Image (tube, coloured by chain):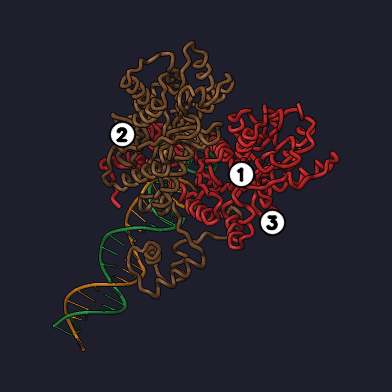
Chain colours: A brown, B red, C green, D orange
Amino acid sequence: MDKDKAGNGKTITIYDIAEEAGVSASTVSRVLNGSASVRKEKKERIQKLIEKYNFKPNALAKGLSDTATRSVGIIAADVRNPYYSALFVACEMAAEKAGYSVVLSNSFGEIEREKAQLDIMLQQKVDAIIQMGGRVDDLITDENYALKVRGICEKTPVVVTGKLDKTSVHSVVIDESGAMEAVMEHLIELGHQKIALVGGEMRVTSTYYKYLKYQEVLRKHGIKEKGEYVINGTYDPETGYECTNRILELEDRPTAIIAINDFAASGAVRSIREHGLRIPEDISLVSFDNTYIADLTIPKLTSIDYDYENYGRVLINTAIAAARGEEVEAVQIITPKLVIRESSGEVGK
Amino acid sequence: MDKDKAGNGKTITIYDIAEEAGVSASTVSRVLNGSASVRKEKKERIQKLIEKYNFKPNALAKGLSDTATRSVGIIAADVRNPYYSALFVACEMAAEKAGYSVVLSNSFGEIEREKAQLDIMLQQKVDAIIQMGGRVDDLITDENYALKVRGICEKTPVVVTGKLDKTSVHSVVIDESGAMEAVMEHLIELGHQKIALVGGEMRVTSTYYKYLKYQEVLRKHGIKEKGEYVINGTYDPETGYECTNRILELEDRPTAIIAINDFAASGAVRSIREHGLRIPEDISLVSFDNTYIADLTIPKLTSIDYDYENYGRVLINTAIAAARGEEVEAVQIITPKLVIRESSGEVGK
DNA sequence: AAGCTCTTTGAAACCGATTTCAAAATTAAT
DNA sequence: ATTAATTTTGAAATCGGTTTCAAAGAGCTT
């Protein structure tokens, strides 16, 4: 490979600086990192040269020699989903504050892609890996992968979102039960008894835990669960639209709908509108994630917020601490909060 | 820094493989890259070991020695904006296909942040940099930065979206004029004469070129331009909402509104609804970008699409070709296409 | 069997930093 | 002015690959 792609400008190195300053490379390195004291006059001479050439040490060489790249790999399901983009940006900011950089990859929920990305990140020697969403359960049951994750953990710590009992990876978990409880109590307080659940797959733990709490709160208030009020699907607007269509055609129509996320809720809004019903006068609608979509729909959605800034910070700090070999709690909890907007109101008003 | 963070598992290297196979590291390297022929039996023995240990060469060492990391840095304004996330994902896919990986950073339009990220990427020795959006004009007029960009271009090629005449960077440009022409002709064909423009800043070239074409098409059809029909702002829902409020309170209300992007359009939808008007019966609404937001609003938005898959591919291919020192056209054009949905209709119907 | 060509191979240098270790230069103490 | 203690410094090794170069080995001719 030709060295000078476009020509003249030679890349300057620590040796060039050393030579011009009349010192050794070691000394320049010490000035660069403040790792040891250097005589004042030399130090200043070196700093002036660094300034002059706008010298920035080669991160590859640095990473090679001290085995820490100060970078964290993030594997997300799909950044086009506002939940992930919000979380990613939060991580990026937190990482920046800690002097780390982040590398992003999208898995699109495909296990093969996820593995390939893991490999690439390991080759790039990131100090830690954060895995957001994706099909966590599948990953863990895939034996090769599970072995691999364990293998990685010895060298490169992995932090995942969502609950995992079997592995030794660190996890940062949203209190899904608490979230669902807040949503249910909010609706029940508004007088709702007929509450439907739209979207989500039961094999996804976060969805499953929400469902369990849904049942529990119903029981607690002496409300009998109706099977036809729970319609599973995926996590997109189409699912929200179709599931809501089915819900609204039921004999005994519910007065409130809980959508698995804002995305699905936006589809629900369309369905409700098309049925000639008003939100929240005829149907209350509540969802999870509190992305900017909750602010775009008409009416604006009541939704569960996770405080993305904090969420991202916890993820990054956990990853960095683990990378440094510090003790970190294996499981950390994110406490959700209900944000009430326009889509939920008193029943039958 | 302690080598073995979590303990035992030693990282295996090309030397370990070489030793166990009873050959030299050079030979293993040759097998790894297929860079030269290796006697069949040795080759197989080596491959078996690579398999056995699931050996993956250290990308840092590789990048250090052959001065090509096969990675492209992408600086976007904000991935939370669906336009950027769509484009980023398209780039990621195209890069993957070419055997490259991508590194993402968000500048949030802040010039200082952008510079810092550029530095980091250069330190990380990406082979090329793609700069999407951001405040291109400002960057170029900032003299230090301009110098720097030129300096970089000698070593690391930069590809930007949007038009730039002064510099030597490569650029991939959406045909904004063509896009606006398609929008205008569409509306005029539907009988609209009173057409308003909402959102966007004139100092942003893409917005400015759209405006020029807007004027041109009006002239061409003998329609007099009304200053009060053009209200600038930023690119978010709030802007769309507020600007549209002002538009709708005009004495001589327009029959069609062109929003600078889907985001702004979603705000416009809210304003129109709040004024008790129907889309498209009372007001037609058209926008640019065709992100998934165009599919979420009620009604769905008629919007200009860029074929993100192709757009991303062009960006990545340009970046990679430039990195390899191949000749690439300095400016490449992306041809937009109008996607007609529910928000535009015949005037006064 | 000798001579020649073509293919394989390994030793060593290099990429650009950091770090260890021992020598050199200062400073402090007697 | 010496000696001891401390601070600065540079040479060399290291991180884990790739590549050049020359030597060794194989395969073909005659």
Cα distance in 3D space between marks 1 and 3: 31 Å
**Label 1 crowd bin: few (<14), some (14–19), many (20+), radius 10 Å:** many
Residue placed most toward the observer, A169 or A36 = A169
Q: Is residue A186 visible?
A: yes
What's the residue type where badge 2 is placed? Arg
For the point 51% across and 19% down, which residue is it? A244
Q: For numbered disc 2, what is the local secondary structure?
A: helix
Secondary structure under tag 1 reads: helix
What is the spatial separation of the Cα atoms under label 2 and label 3, in whole angstroms?
Answer: 53 Å
The type of residue carrying mark 1 is Thr
Which residue lies under the disc numbered 1?
B239
The residue at which mark 3 appears reads as: B166
| Residue labelled with disc 2 | A150
- Between disc 2 and disc 3, the foreground one is 3
Tell me if I can see residue B52 in this picture: no
Residue found at x 44% / y 68%: A47
Q: Is residue B159 left or right of residue A233?
A: right
Q: CA distance from mark 2 to mark 1?
A: 49 Å
